[in-house]
Image (cartoon, helix red, strand yellow):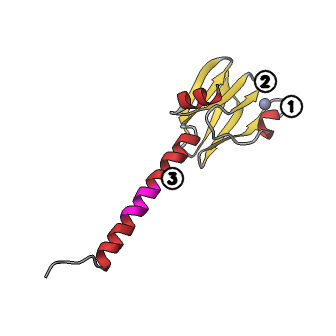
Amino acid sequence: MKKRFGKTDFIVLLVILAVISLAGIFVVLNRENGETVVIFLQGDVYQEIPLTENREIEIQKEGVTVNVLNIRDGKADMTDADCPDKLCVHQKPISKSGETIVCLPNKIVVEVKGGQEGDFDSMAR
Ligand SMILES: [Zn+2]
């Protein structure tokens, strides 16, 4: 007797569909979110960190910690700074390609860069 489309085949099909849709979601998320955080100190690249790493970076100037950047759940947030205005600390966490946090008094710029930046640029133009 020839094997018919049974319950097991149906479950296998469901699993395959689930994997395909998950992969699709991942691609969409990857396109929207940046991949790395670049910290510029006085115009030079200070450090480049993947957004996937959960960690805290102390930005030092002449051996003194001036700003603290926290990377968590794909978002970069300035959690502490020694600048008088604290504008950078009050800025929202960044996660999308092209977003920045700027600390003018300390001349620090934190920028999110993504793999699909080219696409982003052509869309913006
Ligand atoms: Zn600041």
Q: Which residue is mark 1?
A: 85
Which residue is under mark 3? 25
In the rendered structure, which amino acid carries the disc numbered 3? Ile
Nearer-N-terminus badge (2/3): 3
Q: CA distance from mark 2 to mark 1?
A: 9 Å
Quadrant location, the N terminus: bottom left
**Residue at the (29%, 73%) spot, across then down:** 9
Q: Which residue of the protein is positioned furthest toward the right in this rendering? A: 85
Q: Quadrant of residue 46?
A: top right
Residue type at mark 2 is Leu
Q: Position of residue 29 (x, y in %)?
A: 54, 47
Q: Which stretch did the figure color magenta?
A: 16-22
Q: Position of residue 117 (x, y in %)?
A: 55, 30
Image disc number at residue 32: none
For marks 1 and 3, give the CA distance.
Answer: 40 Å
**Mark 1 is on which residue type?**
Asp
Q: Position of residue 45 (x, y in %)?
A: 59, 21
